[in-house]
Image: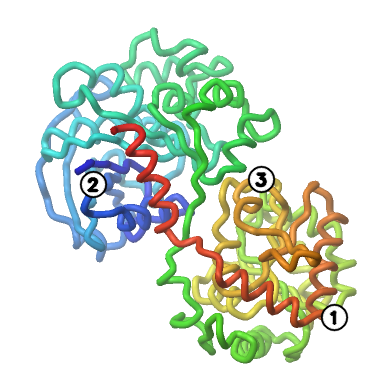
Amino acid sequence: MKKILFMASESVPFIKTGGLADVVGSLPECFDKRYFDVRVMLPKYMCMHQDKKDMMQYVDHFYMEYNGKSEYVGILKAEYNHIQFYFIDDEYYFNGPTPYGDLRFDLEKFIFFDKAALSALPVIGFQPDIVHCHDWQTGLVPVYLKDSFRGGEFFANMKTVMTIHNLKFQGTWDVKTVKQLSGLPDYYFTSDKLEAYKDANMLKGGIVFADAITTVSATYAEEIKTDFYGEKLNGLLQARANDLRGIVNGIDYDEYDPSTDQFIVKKYNQKNFRKEKVKNKLALQEELGLDRDEKKMMIGIVSRLTGQKGFDLIAYVMDELCQDEVQIVVLGTGEEQYENMFRYFDWKYANKVSANIYYSEELSHKIYASCDAFLMPSLFEPCGLSQLMALRYGTVPIVRETGGLKDTVEPYNEYEGRGTGFSFVNYNAHEMLHAIRYAEQVYYDRKREWNKIVDRAMEADFSWDRSAAKYQEMYDWLVP
């Protein structure tokens, strides 16, 4: 049996700030238990909910030299969905109101976590064949395994995988500080290792020293080798191209299931969506104070309102779009300019636009279930989960062909009768508007064709099982 340890800064159900937590929490339970023993190691944050802390049992503790002093390291464990989770406890480092805050302190905290997590393995008696590291917070784990943890039998044969969830975040700080905190010798702080543009870069360290590198979609794996998407690490990623693969994330098909969803007014499935799905639309129109009209095309947006997500394109053509026979429902928070842009259009076109500038799990499910189409015009999107949820609910995605959006949404082809959504290629507002209007035209003039698109969308499989099979393949390649 292969032993795998996921190391990450967050995971559902214990702590979540973004999609990383979904991956780390959902993926381990999808592996074939006969061949893989997958466990997870996280920091024990003070800000975790009390009911989550109550699940944990004390295992052991020890003291570790760190940053010039002897630091307490506690180990706790909890089982959730048949997966063993371990937690590294230290009140000084993990006591903030949120998992992340000040980058300088985050750096010190996660270097401590990387060292403490590896040091804890002999104590708990778990010797993984592969340590699977997620994002920059665990970037020093592959480095330590080649350095201070290399001696002795316990760590000798451990392999590492580095998964990049979003290349924009790299964990960079000045070399002197990182050298002092990590205790790594000068040897590691050169341009072919940890140093990048005169700073130390934790993610770069992980990419250089990991045995395999993955990212969260095949297209993103190609994109990050280019100047535009490579965030200054494209040269390194080209050099490691043979060890880099893209594996699309999944979503939890039990949690996102229109036939059992507790949050929606009318449950439906692939067989009866033609009659039942629209009842959710009428209920949502009523709830949000939009014109009640089951025939009117409703477009949903559930997102962080940031530049990365393409909101400058939407801002540019929003007035034009509001002249069309559509309703637009927005949910999310983010940059002030985009929050205010949607508030303004909500005021100007009150019966057509509903801006919900907050976050609600319940409303997000209602939007996925009620809308006819779902808009995601991202500038870059490593994987994207919203389009997968939209497909699952038969809400036709309209996306820009980048990263995971390109890999998961097949553009509609009217001549071959194929496709699960609509897409456009260039980052251009009118090209986006053209794609939306093409979707409107099919929706209004060729309803049977539209329903076939919905049918194919609901048939697509982006459950975690599919992703897990690809990870298993990679683990088998790493440790035959």
- Horizontal side, residue 123 vs residue 139: left or right: left
> In the image, is residue 220 above or below residue 156?
below
Q: Which residue occupies the foreground of this view, 402 or 114?
A: 402
* Mark 1 touches mark 2? (CB < 8 Å): no
- Horizontal side, residue 359 vs residue 356: left or right: left
In percent of the image, x 48 and y 52: which residue is there? Answer: 249
In percent of the image, x 12 and y 50: which residue is there? Answer: 58
What residue is disc 3 on?
380
Q: Which secondary structure lies at badge 2? A: strand
What residue is disc 2 on?
87
- Mark nearest the camera among 1 and 2 is 1
Crowdedness near tag 2: few (<14), some (14–19) or many (≥20) residues, C-alpha within 10 Å: many
N-term mark: 1 or 2: 2
Crowdedness near tag 3: few (<14), some (14–19) or many (≥20) residues, C-alpha within 10 Å: many
> In the image, is residue 110 above or below residue 268?
above
Q: Is residue 355 visible?
A: no
> In the image, is residue 274 above or below residue 477?
below
What residue is disc 1 on?
445
Q: CA distance from mark 1 to mark 2?
A: 56 Å
In percent of the image, x 43 and y 44: which residue is there? Answer: 100
N-term mark: 3 or 1: 3
Figure label count:
3
Q: Quadrant of residue 377?
A: bottom right
Quadrant into which the N terminus falls:
top left
Q: Amino acid at mark 2?
A: Phe
Q: Is residue 135 visible?
A: yes
